[in-house]
């Protein structure tokens, strides 16, 4: 699907751009890319939800992922980026299955 292709491109691009700098800088850059990827997947699901094409279970899945990701990807997050990346990646996996 187009969503799967986008995810692959985002992951490859994210990995390449996160190579420069020290570990903290790389983690911060990787987290920003991961948050952008999450937002892009969420944008793909928005019209499906508006059209009534997501089940109640999938809507609950997306809502649960948003509760985890919003404090991490929002401005002023105090979490260690290296720790936060895995949470956002898990949320991406969770919501990616909602559109299928």
Image: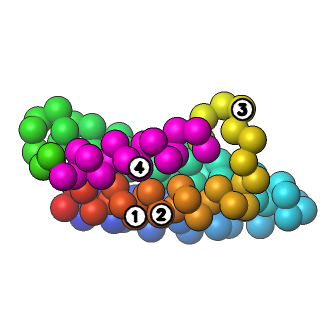
Question: Is tag 1's residue or tag 3's residue first in the polypeptide sequence?
Answer: 3
Magenta span has 13?
Answer: no
Tell me the distance, in whole angstroms, between the alpha carbons under discs 1 and 3.
24 Å
90 relative position to 31: left or right: left
17 relative position to 12: left or right: right
**Which residue was labeled with disc 3?**
76
What label sits on residue 93 in the rendered view?
Answer: 1
Callout 2 environment at 10 Å: few (<14), some (14 to 19), or many (20+)? some
Contact? badges 1 and 2 (CB < 8 Å): yes
**Which residue was labeled with disc 4?**
65
Contact? badges 2 and 4 (CB < 8 Å): no
User: Residue at 52% across / 39% down in the picture?
Assistant: 70
Tell me the distance, in whole angstroms, between the alpha carbons under discs 3 and 2.
21 Å
**Which residue was labeled with disc 2?**
90
Q: How is the image coloured?
A: rainbow
Q: Determine which quarter of the picture holds residue 91.
A: bottom left
Residue 93 location (% of width, % of height) = 40, 64
Q: Nearer the viewer, residue 15 or 83?
A: 83
Task: Indicate whether 25 appears above or below 47.
Answer: below
Span of residues in magenta: 57-72
Name the element at disc 4.
helix
């Amino acid at each position: 699907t187009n969503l799967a292709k986008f995810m692959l491109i985002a992951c490859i691009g994210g990995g390449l751009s996160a190579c420069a700098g020290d570990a903290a800088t790389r983690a911060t850059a990787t987290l920003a890319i991961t948050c952008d990827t999450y937002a892009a997947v969420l944008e793909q699901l928005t019209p499906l939800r508006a059209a009534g094409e997501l089940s109640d279970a999938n809507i609950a899945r997306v809502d649960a992922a948003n509760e985890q990701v919003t404090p991490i990807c929002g401005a002023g997050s105090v979490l260690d980026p290296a720790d936060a990346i895995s949470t956002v990646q898990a949320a991406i996996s969770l919501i990616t299955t909602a559109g299928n």
